[in-house]
Image (tube, grey):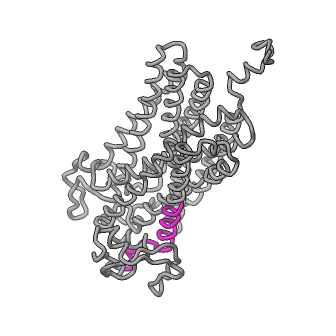
Amino acid sequence: MEDLLAARWQMAVSLGFHIIFACIGMVMPFFMATSHYQYLKTKKPLYKDLTKAWSKGVAIFFVTGAVSGTVLSFELGLLWPKFMLHAGPIFGMPFSLEGTAFFIEAIALGFFLYGWDRFSPWFHWFTGVVVGISGLASGILVVAANAWMNSPAGFDFVDGQYLNVDPIAAMFNDAWFSQALHMTLAAFVSTGFAVAGIHAYMMLKGKNVEFHRMAFVIALLFGGVAAILQPISGDISAKDIAVRQPAKLAAMEAHFETGKSVPLIIGGLPDVKNKKVDYAIEIPGALSFLAHGDFDAEVIGLDQFPEEDHPPVMVTHIAFQIMVGLGMALVGLSLLFFFSRWKKKEWLDARWFLWLFVLGTPLGFIALEAGWTVTEVGRQPWIIYGVLRTEDAVSPIPGIVYSLFLFVGIYVSLAVVVTFLLIRQIKAVPDSLRKASDPKENPFPSNS
């Protein structure tokens, strides 16, 4: 049991770090390509400066994501050998294709970083777009593999044997679309608001305001649209989970007893022993409607499953509430931003407005981590849902707890290095502004 707990904690820490690096690496190239497009259309030097600044960030997160992802691949074999023994031949295809997308991304990024003044301007821009598309494809392919763990497909399980393997059916399992859609939007939301918040803070500091305003607007155009679409994606996911993983939905909603016209619970603390939820707000019939499109529909509760098959209700429910609550807060900020762009452009320079987005900087990533907690903890006690239990897949090698400290150290070190590099990059003065203030570049800086 100690080894199982250590293995799960190690994977939780590793995934918790990697998902941040991966999401930023997936989304930032699109910001970079957008600012580059604006530069090619307008010829404003600040857009070129912004493109180069963001390209350096893309390079940092590409390398960091590659390192953290490689560590994860080692951990799968080290910590979960029985899982990989059975699962590897079945869901290996998306991982193989992800490797192909990764190499395309690496080649395109090299072209983009070293292609300034070497390629034609529009071909150079196109290489940046390829970086974004291939990075996004990598993320979707990895999520497809995770979706297979939630919705096993592409094989027959007979007498403990995995037979008639169909890798295509495994990759395009019933959960892949809803998970890929939700995860992709979450990546744009979390990265968009984090980047916008950082640039809003620099605007408040009065540092290179026009430069940071450009970055702020581009980041929120992506993050804001994704945030508004995310509730639709969440509804698709909830309806899917209600059919495929009713125990997970019951844990998410702390729904203990099967019934009709089930209320939606907002907040609250589950009392698992007495099978109730304290301090919750209830919306009559709303859970039945959200799960099945009918206010009178029956929703399966945890009472329909053996207790040993119940997910951890407290953790799953609270993580779900955090994800939804923060997601709705970001929807509100998105609507505020688009309203300001439409009717109140002066708000973009108002301190109260910028402070709202500074405070919103971490919210997307907190919601992202909470969502992954729901996905992974809500699947327990299964590592392959309904087929292989987590406790049966863990490595029998003693001393796993020591590797926990080693890998935590690796990820903490990566986080420190990346933070240092990003702070230095954010504080850097754009080339065009530095040249404008350099007497050698501009011997007549006055308005004469």
155 in relation to 100, above or below: below
Residue 317 covered by magenta stretch: yes
Residue 56, percent from left and from top: 60, 30
Residue 255's quadrant in the figure?
Answer: bottom left
Q: Is residue 25 at least partly visible in the picture? A: yes
What's the residue at 25%, 46% (across, down)?
167
Vertical arrangement, residue 150 with respect to residue 274, above or below: above
Task: State whether residue 226 is above or below residue 43.
Answer: below
Looking at this view, is 342 or 437 the one in front?
A: 342
Q: Main secondary structure of the magenta part?
A: helix
Quarter-of-image position of residue 253:
bottom left
Closer to us: 125 or 221: 221
In the rendered image, residue 356 lying in the magenta stretch gets the answer: no
**Which image quadrant: the C terminus?**
top right
Q: Residue at the spot x=39%, y=80% of the render?
A: 256
User: Which residues are drawn in magenta?
Assistant: 307-326
Q: Position of residue 198 (x, y in %)?
A: 65, 43
